Image (cartoon, helix red, strand yellow):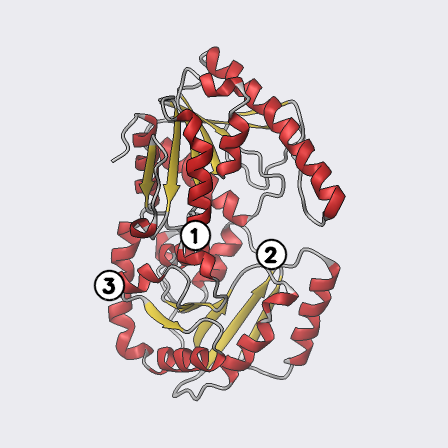
Amino acid sequence: MRFAIMENVASEGGHEIDFDRILVEELSALSHDVEFYVPEGHKFRFDYKKKIHYLKGCGVSYDGAHGAKKAYLALKREYHRQKWYAAMYDYAKAGAFDALIFPSATYRYLRSLRISPLKKSPVPVLFLIHGLTPAEAKKLDDAAAPFATVENIRIGVQTFAKAKLKLTAQHTKIYPPPNYIPRDIPADKQSATAHDTLRLGIFGQYRREKNVDSFIRAFLRGQYNRAVQLVVQGATTNKADAQDFEDLIGRYANENRLLFWHKPLIGAEWQRGLLSVDAVVIPYGNSRYLYHTSAIIGNAMGHRRPIIVADNVNPEILHDYKIGISFKSGDLESLTTAITKFVNGYDADQEIYRQELSRAYRDFSPTLLAQNIISLAEGCYA
């Protein structure tokens, strides 16, 4: 089958790169062809080694926009989206591909489809959605309602919380999210390195409002029976956050239990970063992630690293797989207790983590994601 991927994320981050890599590499491994269709001027931060077609109308980012400017950019984005949809319809009519994928869609994509000729596509159009809150599920149902009898308009929803998701939208397939595996690291170098100091890691974009300092203090308050170190990686996107992170680094300059990385990690460097720690700490709790997928959990499982995670972030994972410890979201004392319990019990629990991570690695294989997308393209919704 020939798949077209319409990628229009203007500010492509590490997660978008990793997800597109899964689509490209896993679909290709299953003997399918993949090509990209992107807005004019779009520059990938990773070479997927696939043919790229450029569409008229540049991508539009909301970064730093507020008020009237953001409203204007929203109108501009919608105008360009209609041009992209029309172009993709022409490609579909010409037989350029057998199925079209929108890899990071929302219900807004379906709203836009109502006035586009693409709704009459002669090939399946797959809108892949990365989790839904109950409110978003209702919006998706409403947006999808006009296409209830349009067989080629299809929706894929990935979630760990399938039992919580109540959808009435037709032509919808619900499936688990993928693990993000260390694709660029040889298999013999993916195991944890034996060392006396247990290394924990906090990864992701740094913003002042995340209050990382409070998480660091929670870690430092722990009473540990072994040497332990916390790696804090932060990618910053503006001067204010960058300065705040540098101030944080300076504040703990003499604390040898802390190691700071002030830089973005992409591709192999991201993979090496995750593999360099023994466990991943996910301290940012958010009720949104009772429904949406936490990409860092998928990364931890794909790199076979146990987790210390807030109890409102994909709780189904620790319910079904003994791969770590949870703590009460927003409760720093609970976080300290969880880290202490994890560190002091690590040697005794390590074999359980290894076995359970192997099971999770298998159950959320990226190959299964590709198979579910193929199944959706073939019209199977079970």
Q: Secondary structure at mark 1?
A: loop
Q: Where on the picture, by quarter, is residue 128?
A: top left
Q: Residue at x 33, y 77 (%)?
A: 346
Q: Circle 2 sits on which residue?
A: 264
Q: Nearer the viewer, residue 122 or 177?
A: 122
- Asked whether, in this view, residue 206 is left or right of residue 200, the answer is right
**Residue type marked 2:** Pro
Q: Circle 1 sits on which residue?
A: 292
**Residue type marked 1:** His
Q: Residue at x 59, y 67 (%)?
A: 210
Q: Which mark is residue 355?
A: 3
Q: CA distance from mark 1 to mark 3?
A: 26 Å
Q: Using the image, determine if residue 73 lies above or below residue 230.
A: above
Image coordinates for residue 67, horizontal then vertical, percent: 73, 47
Q: Nearer the viewer, residue 87 or 265?
A: 87
- Label 3 or label 2, whichever comes before in sequence order: 2
Q: Residues within 10 Å of mark 1 (few under 14, many from 20)?
A: many
- Asked whether, in this view, residue 322 is left or right of residue 13, the answer is left
Q: Using the image, determine if residue 15 lies above or below residue 80.
A: below
Using the rendered image of the protein, determine whether residue 49 is visible from the camera's viewpoint: no
Q: Secondary structure at mark 2?
A: loop
